[in-house]
Structure formats: C-alpha cells, structure tokens
Image (tube, helix red, strand yellow):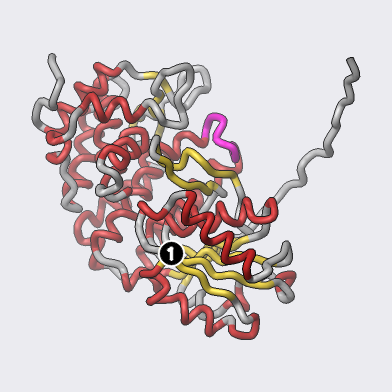
Amino acid sequence: MNEIIMQLPPQQARSYPIKIGKDLLLQPEKWLPVAWQHKRLVIITDDTVNSLYGEKLKHTLSAFQPLLFSFPAGETAKHYQTQHALIEQMLKQYCTRETAILALGGGVVGDMAGFVAATYLRGIPFIQLPTTLLAMVDSSVGGKTGINTAQGKNLIGAFWQPSCVIADVNCLKTLSRAHITQGLIEAVKMFLTSDAQSFQYVNHYGATLFQQDLNVFQAIIASAVKIKAAVVMADEKEKNERMILNFGHTIGHALEKITNYAMSHGDAVALGILVEAKISQLLGLLSQDDYDSIQRLLASWDINAHSLSEMDSTQLIQATYHDKKNIADQVRYVLLSKIGEVYQDDHLFAHPVADEVVKKALALVSGALLHNWKE
C-alpha cells in the first residue's frame, strides 16, 4: 500500500464589512469593492423584489452592464430546479470566474444566490443586499447558503461567506407589518439566547414598535447582527456554539415542512420559540416569569399558538428528525436557562429532548390537546 499525505496550508483569516444605513443601494461606491471594477456583475433577485429594486439597481450599476436574473418569490422556489435554471442562464451568458453575484432580496434570495455563488465554477464571490428585516438581522450574515428538499429545509447547501453585507433600512418602508414582524421574531430569537438588554429594548416598545422611525429599527438590526457576527466568528461551521442561532427552528422548520411552506418562516419560528421555551420550562431550566414575558411580547405582535392545536403532533415530531442538529437519531434542541442565556451542559449548546416532553409542550402552548397526544 502506498500512502501520501496531503498537507494543506492553514486557511487565511477572512473578514468582511456589514454596513447598515439609509440609501445604501443608491450609493454602490460606498460598498462595491474596488477590486470588482472589472468583474462582471450578476444581480439575482425574485420577481417581487425585482419590481421594487431590481431594475433600479441595474440602472444604478449601468456602467458595469450587469445581468439581472429573477425567479418566482417564495420559499417553494428554493429548490434545485431554480438553482439549475440560474446557473444555466449564467453559463449561456459566458460568465467566468471573473463574475460576482449581488443577492438582492430576502432570505430565500440570499440562500439561493449564495448557493449559486458557492457552486458556480466551484465558487465565485457575492454580496448580500438584504431587502427584508428578517434577512437584515439574520440570514444575510454568516455565510449559510442552501436549498430545500422534500425531506426538509436547507438540507443541501454550503458555507460560503459574502464579500460584504449591505442593509439599506429604507427598504423596510415597502414591507407590510407582517413582514416586519417576521424580522423582529428572528431578532428576538437572538436576544433571547444572548442579550437580555436588547430583549428588554424591544419589549419596551411592544406593539408600538411598528410606529417607530427607521432609527429604532437600525438599532435593532445592529444589535442582532453584532450577536450573530460574534457567534459565527466563534463557530463558523456550526459545530457547536452556532447552534444557538437555531433556537426556535427545530420546531419552526418542522412546521414549515408539514405545511408545505404555507406557514411563513417567521410565523413558524415564532411558534417554535414558544414551544422550545416551554420545553425549557418543563425541564426546570426557564422560569415561569421569563416564559410569560416571551409569550406576552409575541402576543403583542398578534402571534398566538392556536394553530398548533390543528397540527398532528406525531407528524410534527417526525419532521424534527430531519433537523441538522440531530445526532444518532436524537432530536436536539437549543434550550434557555433565562432570557438572554442558553442552557449549556458540558460545553454543549443543543440537547436531546424526549418526544413526550415535546408533545406536552405542544399541548400546553396550543391550549388544547393535540391529535394523538395522551397524558
């Protein structure tokens, strides 16, 4: 037997800016890397965002003669057929490794365009240009890209860091209250795991938050991004600590799957937060007062868990067995010890929870016994 050892050089440290402000999309000179002056730019967006910002951005960047590709809006478009179609369009336009992608849109666009960037010619650079609050506070930061499959959400993908993230808070003006709420849920998710003070800041406004100016939202985005950046810097490839960013998502992703994504990501994560916080309480980790604070804040944004009573708990729990945090057929959950702090055991951030505990949490949160659940 011959054995040859491949010894690769250590990976260089990488960094990129995350800029949050007003009118940034109109000022590419503030964020387009100088080294990209001779690159071919490809804007990838969805049909909804295209009508709002796509053509405007293409005009703003007209000196670069960018290509503009869009696909149908919505989570159901985040699959390999869309990725394949985008890649085929780029190949037909003779895009080379001297091409760079601008991901203009919400979380679906960021995941899809990022995955195209990660796989096209084995990797080309891209910039995240999030246009939703959810994408600004969470999905645009950290380098996770991917697509959905019939078995679950984001099961195929790559870690592929952007060259920069540009969050233009003016884009929030075109969002509905429902879309703003979705982003706030992701921000609160991070505050619950890592920043009690920011949770109280949001809690202070409650339902009046929707009446505040963009400066308040810019502060919330900045606080959430600081948390996510710190976690990603500590654990880029989600080996351990980065799992805390998945709080509420074990149940949330399962809800999306069993409703065939008819339930929005934000609504699913909100319910996941309530259920996983209740699991934490049932296990004696989280106080009743802290749980009540979480429930009251979400209720002030018109979020309630009545829809859970219509779900088949067995089907829902079965869907959690495709979660990426699982090990050896054990479904693992991120749990809270108090607002602003996750529970750790032996330096682990995700923990196995018995299905019966999850079923009880589902029943208690929904206010009704679920199908197939017995005390």
Residue drawn at x 17%, y 32% as measured from the top left: 365
Which secondary structure lies at badge 1?
strand
Q: Quadrant of the N terminus?
A: top right
Q: Report the front residue among 338 and 36.
A: 36
Q: Which residues are magenta?
A: 235-241
Q: Position of residue 306 (x, y in %)?
A: 12, 39
Residue drawn at x 16%, y 43% as measured from the top left: 304
Q: Quadrant of the C terminus?
A: top left
Q: Position of residue 268 (x, y in %)?
A: 28, 43
The answer to whether residue 46 is visible is: yes
Q: Report the front residue among 288 and 13.
A: 13
Residue drawn at x 22%, y 54% as measured from the top left: 206
Q: Is residue 350 above or below residue 218?
A: above
Name which residue type carries label 1: Phe
Q: Is residue 242 above or below residue 372?
A: below
Q: Is residue 238 above or below residue 170?
A: above
Q: Is residue 365 left or right of residue 332?
A: left
Residue 91, image quadrant: bottom right
Residue drawn at x 17%, y 47% as measured from the top left: 299
